[in-house]
């Protein structure tokens, strides 16, 4: 699986991606070996996480793209 993730600061994960906000948390927020990452621009992993969000099988229910979203700033898109 090829990953194209965006590395996030702890503050970005907390305030933008809503870490620790339960269901409000972005479903594309993951924890990698170097810290928090956004997996929305990863074609394979992004599709898998999107499917879980749509199916309602993930704890996090947020689709992201809130104010300050780094993924949104980079204008990446997932092909569904």
Image (tube, grey):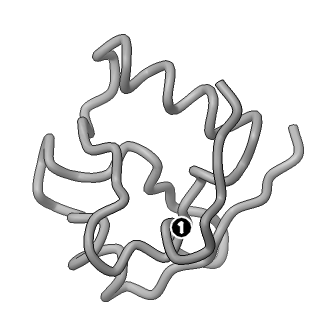
Vertical relation: 19 (above or below) 68: above
Q: Is residue 76 left or right of residue 1?
A: left
Residue in view at x 34 percent, y 54 percent: 64
Q: Furthest residue to the top?
A: 55
Q: Furthest residue to the right?
A: 2
Where residue 54 appears, as percent x and y from the top left, is 37, 18
Residue in view at x 80 percent, y 52 percent: 3
Q: Is residue 33 left or right of residue 1?
A: left
Where residue 59 appears, as percent x and y from the top left, is 25, 32
Quarter of the image with the N terminus in it? top right
Where residue 35 appears, as percent x and y from the top left, is 54, 76
Label 1: element kind:
helix
Location of residue 56 (image quadrant): top left
Where residue 53 appears, as percent x and y from the top left, is 37, 26
Nearer the observer, 72 or 5: 72
Vertical relation: 44 (above or below) 36: above
The residue under label 1 is: 71
Q: Residues within 10 Å of mark 1 (few under 14, many from 20)?
A: some
Location of residue 21 (image quadrant): bottom left
Residue in view at x 14 percent, y 41 percent: 23
Quarter of the image with the C terminus in it? top right
Nearer the observer, 52 or 66: 66
Nearer the observer, 38 or 75: 75
Vertical relation: 47 (above or below) 63: above
Q: Is residue 52 left or right of residue 59?
A: right
Residue in view at x 51 percent, y 80 percent: 8
Please count the marks in the image: 1
């Amino acid at each position: 699986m090829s990953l194209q993730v965006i590395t996030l600061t702890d503050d970005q994960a907390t305030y933008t991606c809503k870490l620790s906000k339960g269901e409000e948390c972005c479903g594309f927020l993951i924890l990698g070996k170097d810290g928090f990452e956004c997996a929305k621009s990863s074609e394979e992993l992004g599709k898998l996480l999107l499917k879980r969000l749509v199916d309602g099988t993930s704890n996090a229910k947020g689709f992201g793209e809130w104010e300050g979203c780094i993924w949104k700033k980079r204008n990446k898109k997932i092909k569904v």
